[in-house]
Amino acid sequence: MSLVFFDPNGQKYTLHMLLHGSDEQKEVHLEKICSLINKGFIPRNNQGIGVAITGLFQSSSKRVRRWAFNAMALLGQRHGRQFVSAVENAVKQSMDDPILLAYAVAALFSVTSDDVQTFKFLKDNGIPVEGALLVASARFSRECATDLVKKKIDIDTADEAVLQNAAILVGVEKVPEGVFSDRHPYKAVIGKLNNHDDKLVQQYSVWAISENPHLAVSDLGVKVIDIESFRPNVKKWIYRLLASDADNASRNRDILSMGSNDDDIDIRQNIASGLAESYFPELENIVLPWFANENEQEIRAQLLEHMATFSGKCNEYENSVMLAYQTAGQESPQRMRLEAAAKQTEIYPKMKRVALQHEATLFSNGNTGGLFMIDNSTTNQFSINGDGNQVSGITQATNLKDVTIKNVQKIEDAELREPLAELVQIIGNSEAADDAKKQALDEINDLAQTPTPEKANKLLKTLKVIGILGNAGIVIGKIAAWANGIPL
């Protein structure tokens, strides 16, 4: 069986986020590592990812530490012994938290690949292998799995910590045969756990359905239409489960649309994560307005990944992705992420050609023989002209737009450059009169050449007068924040 590795650009970006991201971003990317390994992918370099993960054992966020232990447990199945010392220290530091301790001990069994050594360490430190800790360790320890089958898990009487870890076993398909009491068939266990009183038992049970390829929405044991009645931590995983399958997503598009406007960031983030590999016709009617108004950068990045992956399905997806790619810096983490998502699409070669050129040459008038990117007003698709000749049929408005983009790219302050670049695209696609578009682009050019708050506010007033302001959403807010010195 041949090995299937992480995409190199995707792995580079994930490593960057583990080292430099917010707690929420670190959690997202640790979870992504776990999901990929569960699907059979392996990192190209265990050590780099592993060292970053061990650093997160000291995170102030319990959720980050929990996912870090999970990631290490999965990563450690291949060449994990180099991390034994770090995991042993993490076990000692987690002894006052039974839930974290269970995850840490499971990771220790994984990285040692030696039951005798691990049991000795646990005994020396007064840690009994029982209850939730036994269940969690059964994934990586033959002796623990055998002991668990003897003791069995009765889901009617087991405590919450045991049931949480039992749900995880179901999710990763590591349930030892015969571990559940005879009263509950395998799939019925999940349906019952989804209705448990403990919020984490419910959450892990829904997560298990999203991870286990042999389980589906029909195994939830709850009515999807009642989604708003669930706790937020459970609701977010139901949303992800619906979004991750194209057929389910299409059948529940109204529910997904509602979730995309939810005030809870976790819920929107889980929908965006679920859409990473999911598309159905007209999904763009949900995604594009959501993207335009979404203020959380990680969610915007996840939506861009979705659009890059499915850029062949929708012209506006391609436009949004290529604009984001142009706006991002050379060799930036953002470009790595988009390249990884677009690897199997027709826009990937366009990205790579763009990456070979200096940003300023991308929108020239065509006299240098380089690569040029224009917005074709007939098809609304990006086209590449590399023959060095003037592109025919370009209107005066399109030429002005190209020049404007070129000037905007020269702005050093990303907090102004990025929303202005998006604004140029919005103006180009708007139904405003040509003279109104020209007035707006002229003022953007003036602002780009000499960025001042006064010019930015003047531009906002002009947009309001000519009727474009209402269509620009969050972009206008970012420009206004820059003009008024409000940090984004």
Image (tube, grey):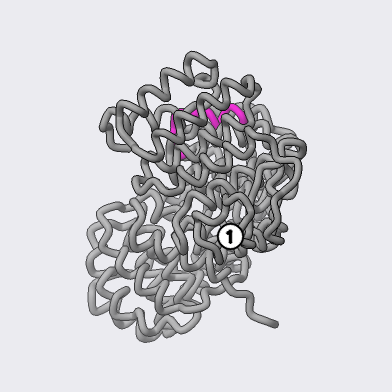
Which type of secondary structure does the marked residue at label 1 adopt?
Answer: helix
Viewer-nearest residue: 264 or 180: 264
Which three-letter amino acid code belongs to the residue tagged 1? Val
**Number of other residues with Cα within 10 Å of mark 1, as a class: few under 14, some 14 to 19, many 20 or more:** many
Q: Residue furthest front?
A: 367
Viewer-nearest residue: 62 or 116: 62
Q: Decide whether the magenta segment is chiefly helix, strand or loop.
A: helix
Residue pointed to by mark 1 = 354
Q: Residue at x 65, y 46 (%)?
A: 374
Q: Residue furthest top?
A: 465
State whether residue 97 is above or below residue 2.
above
- Provide residue 140's location: percent of width, then percent of height: 48, 74
Q: Is residue 4 left or right of residue 89?
A: right
Q: Residue at x 55, y 61 (%)?
A: 35
258 falls in the magenta region? yes
Quarter that holds the N terminus: bottom right
State whether residue 409 is above or below residue 128.
above
Quarter that holds the C terminus: top left
- Provide residue 225's location: percent of width, then percent of height: 64, 27
Quadrant of residue 450 within the rendered picture: top left
Quadrant of residue 296 within the rendered picture: top left
State whether residue 59 is above or below residue 148.
above
Q: Is residue 97 left or right of residue 251?
A: left
| Count of all numbered marks drawn on residues in the image | 1
88 falls in the magenta region? no
Q: Residue at x 71, y 36 (%)?
A: 377
Task: Give the residues in magenta.
Answer: 257-266
Q: Residue at x 61, y 49 (%)?
A: 365
- Tell me if residue 189 can be seen: no
State whether residue 326 is above or below residue 54.
above
Viewer-nearest residue: 326 or 307: 326
- Provide residue 83's location: percent of width, then percent of height: 35, 79
